[in-house]
């Protein structure tokens, strides 16, 4: 593997995503998430996206190889505010990052190995204050500018 200790965007990000079997998005801003999602959809590369902020975390699998799979932007339309809800500004409960990261790793392994049932088409959320997990079903957005629903 190769470690890149720099911000990657544009054509470089697109080429990297096209060269891998799966993308793990652990970024802290919407602009990066939207760009990763767009290139994931274009290259038909599965995306396991996870986020944590304050005391809440979420994870989902977006698999553009599956016709019924919504993409990240179906769930979170681009509102143009890439500074909203950053854990760098709002803080995050440290153990939550490990909990969500472990779930993200499990989803990535299931997806790569083709075993079990991934979170494709579902969003799993954790409230660390109550230690409660919730899962909601996701739908394609027919007006999505990235995947077209």
Image: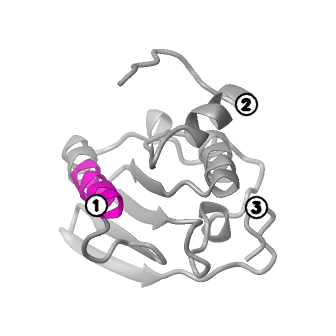
| Horizontal and vertical percent position of residue 8 | 60, 25
Q: If the image is split into quadrants, where does the C terminus sit?
A: bottom right
Q: Secondary structure at mark 3?
A: loop
Q: CA distance from mark 3 to mark 1?
A: 27 Å
Q: Which residue is mark 3?
A: 146
- Image: magenta residue range: 100-113
In which image quadrant can residue 119 be found? Answer: bottom left
Q: Earlier in the sequence, mark 3 or mark 1?
A: 1
Q: Is residue 120 above or below residue 34?
A: below
Q: Is residue 70 above or below residue 33?
A: below
Q: Secondary structure at mark 2?
A: helix
Q: Main secondary structure of the magenta part?
A: helix
Label 1: few (<14), some (14–19) or many (≥20) C-alpha neighbours in 10 Å:
few
| Horizontal and vertical percent position of residue 45 | 55, 54
The tag on residue 41 is: none
Residue at the image position 44 percent from the left and 64 percent from the top: 61
Q: Which residue is mark 2?
A: 10
Q: Is residue 1 above or below residue 29?
A: above
**Camera-nearest label, 1 or 2:** 1
Q: CA distance from mark 3 to mark 2?
A: 16 Å
Q: Earlier in the sequence, mark 3 or mark 2?
A: 2
Residue at the image position 66 percent from the left and 62 percent from the top: 73
């Amino acid at each position: 593997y190769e470690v890149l200790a720099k911000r990657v965007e544009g054509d470089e990000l697109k080429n990297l995503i096209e060269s891998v079997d799966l993308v793990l998005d652990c970024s802290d801003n919407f602009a990066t998430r939207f760009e990763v999602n767009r290139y994931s959809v274009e290259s038909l590369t599965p995306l396991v996206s996870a986020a944590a902020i304050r005391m809440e975390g979420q994870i989902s699998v977006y698999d553009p190889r599956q016709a019924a799979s919504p993409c990240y932007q179906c769930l979170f339309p681009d509102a143009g505010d890439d500074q909203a809800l950053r854990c760098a500004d709002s803080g995050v409960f440290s153990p939550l990052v490990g909990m969500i990261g472990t779930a993200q790793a499990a989803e990535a392994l299931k997806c790569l190995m083709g075993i079990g049932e991934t979170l494709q088409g579902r969003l799993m959320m954790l409230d660390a204050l109550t230690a409660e997990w919730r899962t909601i079903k996701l739908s394609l957005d027919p007006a999505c500018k990235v995947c077209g629903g």
